[in-house]
Amino acid sequence: MHFINQTTNQFSFGDSLPPGPGWELVSAKQFNALRSTGWSPTEYIQPHRVSKDTIVSRVNEAGKLNDLIVAINTLPVDKSFMWTHFAWFWSNNPTIVGMCQSLGLDPLQILATDPYLS
């Protein structure tokens, strides 16, 4: 099924309506007609879990482990507590996404599907 959200400029293909307001089911013909008018949405990706081990391994592979350590040490107390005590994070966690961006890393790569949690 084809789902679009013109408010957020996103599309999704799947079996169920994505969460949030503004989503509508359209036919393939309607979807292609919108695309032919120049509409260029981004794909909505359902949030998934990513283990902290996977995040750290990917950051280490990117050569930014020391920078991650510094970033973790500068987190506010509540965020530091969550980093320390959580085993995994949602792929759209704003704190983790922000940390990736501040390290100059692509959050989509660092928070990509975790082969150990899929």
Image (cartoon, rainbow, N blue to C red):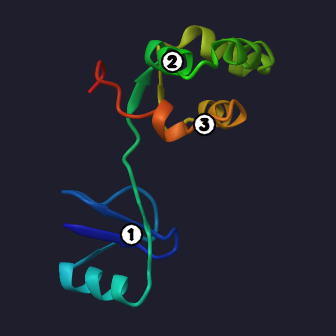
Residue kind at label 3, given as amino acid type: Val
Please give the name of the residue rendered at 81% of the width and 18% of the height, measured from the top-left corner. Answer: 74
Q: Please state if 7 lies on the left or on the right of 75 as rendered.
A: left
Residue 93 location (% of width, % of height): 56, 35
Above or below, comparing residue 65 to residue 5 in the picture: above
Classed neighbour count for the residue bearing mark 1: other residues with Cα under 10 Å, few (<14), some (14–19), many (≥20): some
Q: Please state if 95 lies on the left or on the right of 48 as rendered.
A: right
Q: Please state if 34 lies on the left or on the right of 28 as rendered.
A: right
Q: Which mark is residue 97?
A: 3
Q: Earlier in the sequence, mark 3 or mark 1?
A: 1
Residue 8 location (% of width, % of height): 52, 68
Q: Quadrant of residue 77?
A: top right
Distance between mark 3 and mark 1 Cα atoms: 24 Å
The N terminus sits in image quarter: bottom left
Please give the name of the residue rendered at 61% of the width and 15% of the height, measured from the top-left corner. Answer: 83
Q: Quadrant of residue 28?
A: bottom left
The C terminus sits in image quarter: top left
Q: Which residue is mark 1?
A: 23
Q: Earlier in the sequence, mark 2 or mark 1?
A: 1
Q: Which residue is mark 2?
A: 61
Residue kind at label 1, given as amino acid type: Trp
